[in-house]
Image: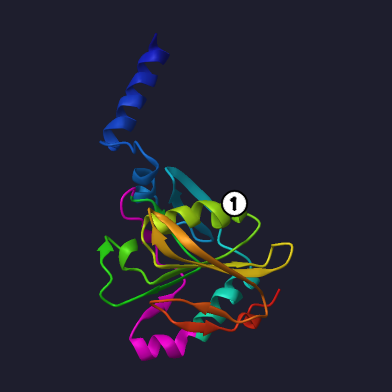
Amino acid sequence: MVAMMEEKHQTESTYASFPHLPQTAREMFDVLPPLPGFRVEVIEGKLIVSPSGTPEHFLTSDELSYALRPLRTERGWNGAYGPHICIDGPRDSVQPDYVLWPPDCKRWGNELLSPGVIMAAEVVSPSSVDIDRKEKVRLYALGRVPVYLLIDPLADEPAVTVFSEIKDDAYQVRNTTLIGTPIKLPTPIDFELDTSIFTV
C-alpha cells in the first residue's frame, strides 16, 4: 500500500512538472532540445531522428552551395544547409541538405514556411533512401516548394533528379540525369547545374 502511494505521488509530481505533455509528433519536435549529430524531422506525422550524415554527404551539400553562390549573389537569395522548412498545411518540419530562399521568405517561428522557399535539395544516404525518394517528393509538392533537387549517389547509376511544376499537390515534371551531366534547374531558378561536382 505504501509503495503504491509513493508511486502515485511520484507520478503526480511528474505530471505537475509537465503541464502539457506532447500529444503529437509535431508537439514533441517543438519541445525537444538540440540533438547535436542528429537530424530531427516531422514527416507525415512521424518524428524521425537520423544521423546528420557522413563527411561526403556534407561535402555534396557544400559543392552545391558553392556552385549556386554566383546566382545567389546576383538574385539576392539566401542558401544554406540547416534551416528547417515548415510544410504549410500539415506543419511537418523537414531539414533539407540545402535550401534556397529569398530574404523575405515568411517564417513559422524559426522555420522557413514552405511556399516561400525557392528550392529544397536532398542528398540520399542509407538512412534516408525512402524518405528522400518518396515521402519528401510528396511533402515538398504539398508545401508548394517550386523545385526539389534530389542528388542520389546510391542509385544503381548515380543520378540527379529535378522535380518541378506543381499541380494538384504533386510535381508534374521529373527530369533525371546521370551524375556528371549538366541539368537545368527550372523557373524560378533558371540555372544549368554541372553535376560533375558531385563525386561518387
- Residue 59 lies in the magenta-colored region: no
Amino acid type shown at disc 1: Asp
Q: Is residue 17 above or below residue 174?
A: above
- Residue 8's spot in the image, x, y percent? 35, 19
Q: Nearer the viewer, residue 144 or 10?
A: 144
- Residue 25's spot in the image, x, y percent? 40, 42
Q: Is residue 188 left or right of residue 135?
A: left
Q: Secondary structure at mark 1?
A: helix
Q: Nearer the viewer, residue 43 or 163?
A: 163
- Residue 116's spot in the image, x, y percent? 31, 68
Residue closest to the far top: 1
User: Which residue is located at x 62 percent, y 55 percent?
Assistant: 129
The reply to whether residue 74 is visible in this rendering is yes
Q: What's the magenta region?
A: 68-90
- Residue 97's spot in the image, x, y percent? 51, 67
User: Which residue is located at x 67 percent, y 75 percent?
Assistant: 179
- Mark 1 Cα shell of 10 Å, populated few (<14), some (14-19), many (≥20): few
Q: Nearer the viewer, residue 118 or 48?
A: 118
- Residue 72 lies in the magenta-colored region: yes
Q: Can you tell which quarter of the image residue 7 is in?
A: top left
Q: Is residue 135 above or below residue 102?
A: above
List the residue tagged with mark 1.
130
User: Which residue is located at x 35 percent, y 81 percent?
Assistant: 77
Q: Nearer the viewer, residue 88 or 5?
A: 88
Q: Is residue 159 left or right of residue 41?
A: right
